[in-house]
Amino acid sequence: GAVVSQHPSRVICKSGTSVKIECRSLDFQATTMFWYRQFPKQSLMLMATSNEGSKATYEQGVEKDKFLINHASLTLSTLTVTSAHPEDSSFYICGVLAGGTDTQYFGPGTRLTVL
Amino acid sequence: DAKTTQPTSMDCAEGRAANLPCNHSTISGNEYVYWYRQIHSQGPQYIIHGLKNNETNEMASLIITEDRKSSTLILPHATLRDTAVYYCIVRVNNAGNMLTFGGGTRLMVKP
């Protein structure tokens, strides 16, 4: 399957700071990337869909000004959590739609802890 | 996308086959059945998918009933490393289509 990386794997930050998470598709081009978040003992929840060269589409209840998404190239999407607060602490996972297929592959996830 | 129903948890003995059921009684004709698994603190891993016919790959087999209202994921020889949450997802194959995750089945493989 396709290889997807995320960086960093874990981050601890102070309340009020911003954190950037990168998602890269390493062996294929991805026109569409998805950002999910997962709270403890819960399933993955889609936050937004990121399309290369256009604005991301956010799910209901997800603040676009707080979770900034930039899909600048066919291999890179970034999620910036702005002015992070403890309630933003979660496991953030990106999913990538492999070009030419309809199968989504996932990154290893980024665990964010906001103190 | 059609809703799926899976048991909350299952146990399996190491070395035995693990059979994970999924009900998707409202599946429509153009919806595929996808299976992913998530090992603790990792991103989901794609396992297999199918439309009508049974499928097999190096990880697992997928058996879809003739009426397509249910399916079974089979791990032929479960190992301790197969302990994970297994998600059955039904979706139409369109470019840009996202996945909707339910609760999944927590499979515990025991020695």
Image: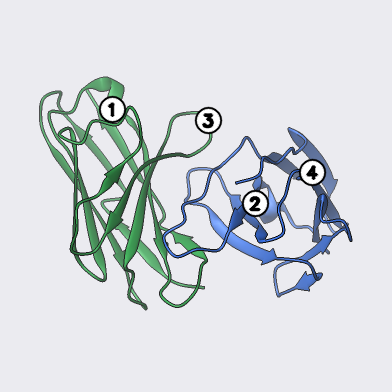
Chain letter, green: A
Q: Report crowding for label 3: few under 14, some 14 to 19, many 20 or more residues within 10 A (C-alpha).
A: few
Q: CA distance from mark 2 to mark 4?
A: 11 Å
**Whole-percent x and y of residue A56?**
24, 49
Q: Report crowding for label 4: few under 14, some 14 to 19, many 20 or more residues within 10 A (C-alpha).
A: some
For discs 3 and 2, the disc positioned in front in the rendered view: 2
**Whole-percent x and y of residue A49?**
33, 50
Closer-to-camera residue (B85/B68): B68
Helix, strand or loop at mark 4: loop
Closer-to-camera residue (A114/B27): B27
Q: Which residue is mark 4?
A: B25
Which disc is residue B90 wearing? 2
Q: Report crowding for label 2: few under 14, some 14 to 19, many 20 or more residues within 10 A (C-alpha).
A: many
Circle 4 marks a residue in which chain?
Answer: B
Does residue A101 appear in the picture of this structure? yes
The answer to whether the residues at label 4 and label 3 have Cβ atoms under 8 Å apart is no
Q: Which residue is mark 3?
A: A42
Circle 3 marks a residue in which chain?
Answer: A
Q: CA distance from mark 3 to mark 2?
A: 19 Å
For discs 4 and 3, the disc positioned in front in the rendered view: 4
